[in-house]
Amino acid sequence: MPMQTSDHVTSLNRLFIQALLRMGDAGEIDAACRLAAQGWSLLRHDHPHEAERLNGAMHNLTNPKRRNNQLQADAGAAIPFSQPR
């Protein structure tokens, strides 16, 4: 039995969310949120459940813990490693 259109949307949205969260893990939180918002806008009328999943991803991306982890990672990368003499 072939997949229904809504099944395709659900599957693609799950992949999209995984990619967005990986972008967030890589420090591209703002770009990931913009893409998630665009996806939400496309899905909100015809696929409200999937739009809500994207809303959850945006909340995950903007979680203060994620932001703090990214700030700590950025700060650690900015400090040059020095060899003991």
Image: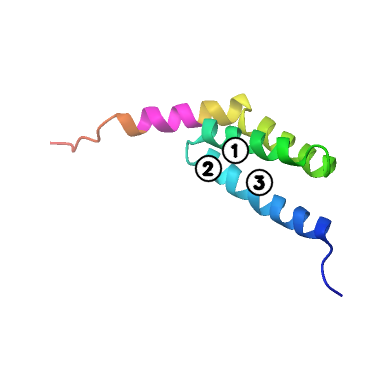
Left or right: where does residue 7 sit relative to residue 29?
A: right
The residue range painted magenta reads 70-76
Which marked residue is nearer to the observer: mark 1 or mark 3?
A: 1
Residue 23: horizontal and vertical position, in percent?
53, 42
The answer to whether residue 54 is visible is no
Task: Tell me whether circle 2 and circle 1 mark residues in contact (CB < 8 Å).
Answer: yes
Residue 36: horizontal and vertical position, in percent?
64, 37
Residue 77: horizontal and vertical position, in percent?
34, 34
In front: 46, or 15?
46
* SS state under label 1: helix
Indicate which disc, 3 or 2, sits on the residue closer to the N terminus. 3
User: Tag 1: residue type?
Assistant: Leu
Please identify the residue farthest to the bottom as the structure is shown. Answer: 1
User: Tag 2: residue type?
Assistant: Met
* SS state under label 3: helix
Residue assigned mark 1: 35
Indicate the colouring scheme. Answer: rainbow
* SS state under label 2: helix
Of the 4 image quadrants, the one containing the N terminus is: bottom right
Q: Main secondary structure of the magenta part?
A: helix
Q: Is residue 38 above or below residue 1?
A: above
> Magenta includes 59?
no
The answer to whether residue 55 is visible is yes
> Magenta includes 75?
yes
